[in-house]
Structures are given as structure tokens and as C-alpha cells.
Amino acid sequence: MPDRYPARGLLGVFVLLVAMLTDPIPAMVGDSLPLEGLDGQRLEASSLEQGVTLLVVWASWSPRCRDVVSRLHRLAETWSDQAAVGSVVFQESPEQIEDFLAGKRLTTPVYFDRSGKFSKHHAVTTLPMLLVFRDGERIFRGRLSANPDPTIERALASSSEDARTGSTVPSGTVPSSTVPSSTSAGA
């Protein structure tokens, strides 16, 4: 007997797709790497497997990324003694980024996600996006706010506490009680 409510099937497919797209993606990064860098360097999975790495995903065409160079400088000044700091450019060529960076002094590495695979793997939905990795695991994914320091501190503290207590916070997330409301506000 045919289903009297065919929309139920479509609703089920829709719910499944939404769950797949919004569920935290496993934090391991191997499938989406390596990425080629602007100066010939490469971002390998092994680069993210030791210590803390802060990556900002951005694009020169995004109005919210116009000040990305100064924001990357601030991140490097604040966090370089505790973390590697770099950036991933979303689906742009080295030539486009060289033009964008002309006259600007960027001291952090720039890697290219030409295919978008890295960004898709880490569910990058807004630019600029901050990704925080500790020992190969993504511990935070969120919009790069005007002042990301409290968010980074909370992510690092939360992941350290989880390691000590055996807590099972889903990978790639920070408990909502630890994320300041300013992270959802415009940068």
C-alpha cells in the first residue's frame, strides 16, 4: 500500500542531510591535508599532531576578511609562544592572494585550500573561521571574533579538563557554557 504521506520520506531525508551537515565532523585532519603554502611550505597532518595550532580560514573576496592580516598579527603576537599560528585561504589562487597581500606584511604561513576539501571537512560555514587543534584533534571551530583570546583560552582549558576527567565533549566543539556570546557577534 502506498504511503499516504510521501512528505514523511522527504522529511526523513532532509533531517538526515541536516544531521550529517551539522553534526560535529570527526576532528582528525588527515583526509583534507596536505595543503600547499604561499612560500612553498606545506601543511601536513603531522604539523597538527603535536601541540596547539590556530588556523584562520579566510578569503580575500570576503568583506569580513579585509583586516585578516592585522588579526593574524595579533593572534601570532598573543599566542605564538603557546601555539603555531597560520591561515588557510578558501578556494583562491596564489596569484590572487599575492595581489591581496601586496604592501601588507604577513608573518604567519598561508596555505591554500583550492579544492575546498579542508574547509568542507571542518564545516567552515563563515569567514573568517577560527580552528583550534591540539595534538591532532580539532577542539574548537567558530567564527573569528574581534577578540578571540577568551574563546581560545576556554577551548584550551576545556580540552585540558576533558583530558584529565575523561569527559566526552564531542570533537570540534566547546561546551556552549564556555563560548562567550560575543563569538556569534560580528567581528
Image: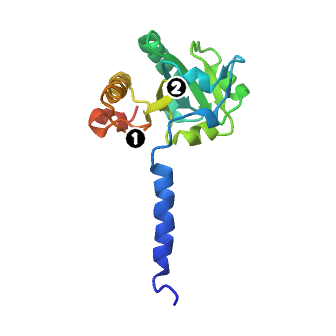
* Residue at 44% across, 37% down: 172
Which mark is first along the chain, 2 or 1? 2
Q: Which residue is mark 2?
A: 55
Q: Secondary structure at mark 1?
A: loop
Q: Nearer the viewer, mark 1 or mark 2?
A: 1
* Residue at 63% across, 20% down: 101
| Residue 86 drawn at (x, y percent) | 55, 21
Q: Secondary structure at mark 2?
A: strand
Q: How many marks?
A: 2
Left or right: residue 94 versus residue 158 is right
Left or right: residue 37 versus residue 2 is right
* Residue at 59% across, 28% down: 88
Contact, mark 1 vs mark 2 (Cβ under 8 Å): no
Q: Which residue is mark 1?
A: 170
Q: Which residue is situated farthest in the bottom direction here?
A: 1
| Residue 91 drawn at (x, y percent) | 65, 36
Left or right: residue 105 versus residue 94 is left
From what the image shows, is residue 98 above or below residue 4? above
| Residue 178 drawn at (x, y percent) | 29, 33
From what the image shows, is residue 4 above or below residue 131? below
Query: Which quarter of the picture shows residue 102?
Result: top right
Name the one closer to the observer, 56 or 51.
51
